[in-house]
Image (cartoon, rainbow, N blue to C red):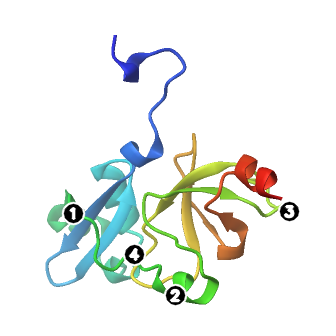
Amino acid sequence: MTDDASPGRHRTPVKTWKLYSVSVPGFGREIIHALSKQDALREARNCEAFGSMTLTRFRQIATAYMLREPLEDDGYDYIRQQYGLDVRVSRRCWIQDQKSSSYGKSGTILYAGRSTSHVRVALDGSDTPLNFHPLDVSLVPPESRSQAA
């Protein structure tokens, strides 16, 4: 039995969420973080770049492939500069907003677009990513913060 199959072990979002490039000739390209190629195509259909196209036509000509190399521009430069928070795609984080129903939960930072002012997070055990204000996200586990205080 391997470690991955050991009782109590589960897949982590870092291994589950993948980056896909979805493109449509004549309409552009979008980078989408998704659980599968089909999910990436479904989410891309809602992007403004492809909005003027019928669903039937989109399905006929859209292509998607998984990106294997890290992105040069992960879209989080603004947050790193303005908030001093070293947000990186696929990095673990914890929600520290006490008013949020997600308070204390951990997750994985996802690609949010080419330029963003929010942190897109896939909370552990959830298939739907959420956007959080940078001040609501911590890169330090709660137990480490309480020990340092």
> Mark 3 to mark 4: distance in Å?
30 Å
Say which label, 3 or 4, has the lower sequence index: 4
The residue to which callout 1 is attached is 69
Where is residue 65, by image quadrant? bottom left
Q: Mark 4 or mark 1: name the one nearer the start of the chain.
A: 4
Mark 2 and mark 1 in contact? Answer it, CB < 8 Å: no
> Tag 3: residue type?
Lys
Q: Which residue is mark 3?
A: 99
Marks 2 and 1, how far apart in space?
A: 22 Å
Instruction: Report the residue marked by disc 4.
Output: 47
Looking at the rendering, in which quadrant would you find the C terminus?
Answer: bottom right
Residues under labels 3 and 2: Cα distance?
25 Å
The part of the image, by quadrant, that contains residue 66 is bottom left
Q: Which residue is mark 2?
A: 78
Left or right of 75: which side holds 144? right
Q: Secondary structure at mark 4?
A: loop
Q: Is residue 132 above or below residue 103?
A: below
Q: Is residue 115 above or below residue 109?
A: below
Q: Secondary structure at mark 3?
A: loop
Q: Amino acid at mark 4?
A: Cys
Quadrant of the rendering where the N terminus is positioned: top left
Q: CA distance from mark 3 to mark 1?
A: 37 Å
Q: Residues within 10 Å of mark 2 (few under 14, many from 20)?
A: some
x, y percentage for residue 99? 85, 62
Tag 3 and tag 1, C-beta contact below 8 Å: no
Q: Residue at x 53, y 81 (%)?
A: 80
Q: Amino acid at mark 1?
A: Glu
